[in-house]
Image: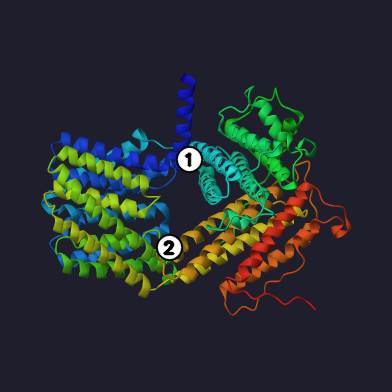
Amino acid sequence: MRAAARRWWTGTLDRVAASDPGLLRLAAGLRTVGAITLTLGVLSLADAEVSRLVAGAVAAMVATFAVREKGRGPQAVTLALGLPVALASLSLGALLSTRWLAGDVFFVALVFGAVYGRRFGERGTALGLIAFQVYFLSLFVGATTGALPALWGTLAVAFGCAAVARFALVPQTSAGILLRLRQAFRARLAQLLDAQLGLLDAGPAEVEKALADARAGTARLHETAMLIQGRLEEGTPDAPTARLLQRRVADAEICAERLGLLLLTARSAERADTLTLHLPGAPVPEGGHLPVRDPATDALRRDLRALRTLVRHPVAGGAGLAPVRNRLLGYRDEENLPAASPPVQDVFRGVGEAARAVLGLRAALDGPQDESADSPETARSREELDAEDAAIDGAERAGDEAEEEREAGLRRPTTRAAVQVAVGSALAIVGGELLSEHRWYWAVLTCWIVFLNTASTGEILVKGYRRLLGTALGVVAGIGLAALVGHHTVTAFAVVLLCVFCMFYTAPLSYTLMSFFVTAALGVLYTLLHTYSLDVLLLRIAETALGVACGVFAAAFVLPVRTDRRTDELLTAVLDRLGDVTGAAVEQLSGGPPADLLDRARELDQALADLRAATQPLTHPVTPLRTRRDTAEYVVALLETCAYHARSLAATAELLPSHPSIAADPRLRGAGQRILDNIGAVAARVGDERSTAEVRTGPSVASLLKPGAFGAPRYGRVTDRVLRHLQRLDEAVVGLARPLAVPLARPAG
């Protein structure tokens, strides 16, 4: 009974860790709720009136979510600087409350300065956000000069309670966050293996859903790997430790993705296209006869479950798991493979490589393991991992960072956005005051918010639509909640705290949901301030719609950045990174000097994530341009396929010269040159439609796998895999030519 309860609890923790990597959303919600609760408690002991309670709650929320630095020291400095900024903003709001023209002009100037401050990094962004939100707070609670001393005290209490919540109640360190992200990676890896088991066993009626689950699991694992990458520098004690963890996470991610592709191939009549794992809605490869019941596939199901157990089990060296681990690692040797068709044998090889990646990941995460029950195959795998670790410890990190060319003047993104939001806010003030003399500021707030974390007209349009939808739904909820709580202060604040928690917990998942909870909470706050009415909530919808319209108008007509231009710039950046990673990996595999390949691969992943976010306006379900949407999805999926193969090449190249079974082969340089030329041709065409660059096709890279290629015997299995990655990368890059209108060169002769 106790063992079953322990398994249930462990499984629950794994599911929570997988659903919220690093528990970042949970911590953000609890920290904000804790700050607000402390503030309300302190102010209640001081017998503060309801308007001060509302002001304190909002100020505590702002002081909590505005500070985004990763280190505790920088967070404390920003929070300390934020208090005088907030006091000044509140005071100016109260002083200008009776001077409407001067107040409007200052509000527009404040908006400009707050957005422009983003160019100074996270601290500039935080201080600008505090200044704007506290000025808005002064309008919301109707601050006057006579009430300033009490409100100053309220702000001081709110910032103090925010500091207590951040550093004492819900403390987070970079090392602690990285630890939880590692746990999330392990949990998501186990979930992906579950999905791959489902893909193996799915019949014709279930295979589409099983493939969709495998795609989602692959994407979620990659998301967690990127989160780990962003915390390595602050969360590890030194560079070698960060480098080791980076490599082990990359190995595990690549092996898991390769295993899914091998399973797809085993189900197919021919080798599956990697694009199938990245393009939503891509058909399942036809042919094949899995699932079947024969000794080989039964053993494969057993071993996939065993691999999942190795990932989930907290201790890898237990007596019960050692034989399982040894069996899986044995599949790295040809003589240990079961009798089966070549595609199924490839899956067993993939299981062996994945088991090796899990062994390395566990050593990096949990430290030294029990080696007493190791088989010769397991001992060999450990020796390989130790050699790689030693190579990392002795490596000198290159410190040459290219100086990025920065845009100046109105072309600088922060300056352009500041001008746009200032114009939009001025329009929102004029229009908002026509709708309401007292609550026009809602339009300005919406205009400000739709410009946060957006960079093109299309992104602003999509964000505005989501905010308007969430606001409309939140008004309905606000009406019901206001009727339920009435004027019961304690109950009302409890409902507000619940809404605030849900707002921060759902913010990274859905902007619509976040807007819903914000508006629902406002309905309750208006009840506390005795200003609630149905007309007020309907006015909020109208002001929100006006703010969205003003923001979209400013983005479209004031120094506009069209979505096409933005996506072309990001697409060019992705292609440049792809060429950089591929060229460096091929050069190193050919015997060239070592380079920081995994860092470059993660830069490629980040560039691709930026492109994926920028294409959301083109791929949104309600877009009327269906052909354009399909093209954007196809191009992004092709680039994700390219990134997978580039990561795999980089990870293999990083094993040189420590891996005993991998040797550099200068003949690979010729196999990769055409791919690099084609990447350059596609990037040139995207950057300039007048470019005459063409994509060249020729003999398949896969033909290099044939015996006698290059006048030499067949390569070893690792080199075969490198050439297969080059072949798939070549096919994907050539595939980009058609949707991006890059001409194909005529065959010679």
Vertical arrangement, residue 613 with respect to residue 684, above or below: above
Q: Tell me, yes or no, if residue 150 can be seen here.
A: no
Is residue 635 found left or right of 124 in the rendered image? right
Question: Which element is circle 2 on?
Answer: loop
> What residue lies at 40% left-to-right and 50% top-to-bottom?
509
Vertical arrangement, residue 447 with respect to residue 27, above or below: below
Query: Can you identify the residue that label 2 sits on?
Result: 620
**Foreground residue among 643 and 116:** 643
Of badges 2 and 1, the one in the foreground is 2
Vertical arrangement, residue 611 with respect to residue 239, above or below: below
Give residue 546's quadrant in the image. bottom left
Q: Tell me, yes or no, if residue 557 can be seen here.
A: yes
The three-letter amino acid code for the residue at tag 1 is: Ala
Percent coordinates x, y for residue 609 in the rendering: 51, 56
Question: Which element is circle 1 on?
Answer: helix
Q: Which mark is residue 408?
A: none
Percent coordinates x, y for residue 748 in the rendering: 78, 76
* Quadrant of image for the C terminus: bottom right
What is the crowding at mark 2: few (fewer than 14 residues within 10 Å), some, or many (at least 20)?
few
Is residue 414 found left or right of 332 in the rendered image? left
Q: Are marks 2 and 1 in contact (CB under 8 Å)?
A: no
The three-letter amino acid code for the residue at tag 2 is: His
Vertical arrangement, residue 677 with respect to residue 273, above or below: below
Q: Which mark is residue 18?
A: 1
Q: Mark 1 or mark 2, which is nearer the start of the sequence?
A: 1
Please, which residue is most extreme toward the top here? 1
Percent coordinates x, y for residue 32 in the rendering: 31, 42
Is residue 542 found left or right of 25 in the rendered image? left
**Foreground residue among 301 and 463:** 301
* CA distance separating discs 2 and 1: 26 Å
Give residue 666's quadrant in the image. bottom right
